[in-house]
Image: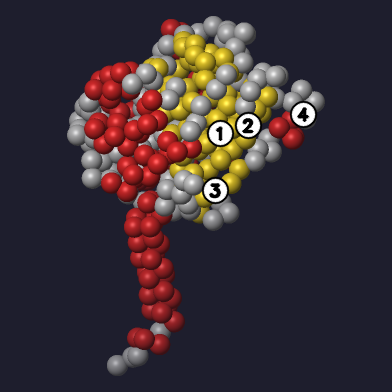
Amino acid sequence: MPNLSRNPWITAATAVAGAGALAVAYATLVERNAFTLRTQTMEVLAPGASPLRVLHISDLHMMPNQKLKQEWIRELDRLEPDLVINTGDNLAHPKAVPAVVQALGGLLARPGLFIFGSNDYFGPLPKNPLKYFKKDHKRVTGEPLPWKDLRAAFNERGWLDATHNRRELRAGGVRISAVGVDDPHLERDRYDTVAGPANPDADLRIALTHSPEPRILDLFAQDGYDLALAGHTHGGQLCLPVYGALVTNCGIGRSRVKGPSRWGAHMRLHVSAGLGTSHYVPARFFCPPEATLLTLVPAKSDTSPATENQAVSRSEAGVR
């Protein structure tokens, strides 16, 4: 009888299978709970404006029993941001509204803006992951979720709903003009309801969308917004070393799947990699869940385009 243990093909196959099993275990048990705070400086304010600390959170995909995630989010209030921006996909379960509200805790007492995403409206469904590689795949929605209850809770605590609304507010001494659209991923956006030039007298003009679809970003840029914020991509969720994200699940390219980038001659874009995962793909690989503390500062008029892309960032495993 041949000695299979010495067969190089069997040995290689066993090694590959073992490595795959370890990768799956790491992605599902370790990295998806390795919540990370990323900090970023972006030059977007009007000259002379005071620096503004903005906490960008997105894609919580909260389940009622996710106590570790809830506790980590609750600690974010210690950062004392001037403004909180939530770009949607808070829910993943019909009974998750109390968990989201309790996790956000003190952040809800701070100035805030929000919009919703597809997973605020509809629960997750199992699907073939390979469909994410096909941009025009048919979208199937799950059971309706209590997004109206979540919106009421946010509004009661003072956060402003930017969905198809123009909002004016002041935070950290900065006068802000904001606008938002409903989720383009579900084709719920109606930009015509808020179209028109951004307020030229504001120190900062912000635009919000859950899914960073180019057609919406182009309209924001055309109307003169300084900064667009989005989520939805999960930073690719499953990434490869060096190569990065495999897919973006929307129309933007892989290089913009998370973090800051330029969109057009004037507008900047920040895409959050988010804090959660799909309930049916509870894994992250080379893409830890994150929230971002953005420090917005005045733009330098003499900065060249090449230099403007160089934003300062660092990551840390927890909130200090």
Image position, residue 190 (x, y; %): 41, 13
| Residue closer to the observer: 196 or 55 | 55
- State how far apart marks 2 and 3 are (Cα): 16 Å
Image position, residue 289 (x, y; %): 43, 45
Mark nearest the camera among 3 and 4 is: 3
Rendered residue at 40%/84% (across/down) = 7
Residue at far bottom of view: 1
| Amino acid on which disc 1 is placed | Leu
Mark 4 and mark 2 in contact (Cβ < 8 Å)?
A: no
- State how far apart marks 3 and 4 are (Cα): 26 Å
Q: Residues within 10 Å of mark 3 (few under 14, many from 20)?
A: few
| Residue closer to the observer: 143 or 170 | 170
Residue 307's place in the image compared with 302, above or below, is: below
Rendered residue at 40%/17% (across/down) = 160
State the residue position of label 2.
42
| Amino acid on which disc 4 is placed | Thr
State the residue position of label 1.
294
The answer to whether any part of residue 157 appears in the image is yes
| Amino acid on which disc 2 is placed | Met
From the viewer's perspective, tell me whether residue 202 is left or right of residue 240. right
Rendered residue at 20%/33% (across/down) = 94
- State how far apart marks 4 and 1 are (Cα): 19 Å
Mark 3 and mark 2 in contact (Cβ < 8 Å)?
A: no
- State how far apart marks 2 and 4 are (Cα): 13 Å
Identify the secondary structure beneath mark 4.
loop
State the residue position of label 3.
315
| Amino acid on which disc 3 is placed | Ser
State the residue position of label 4.
303
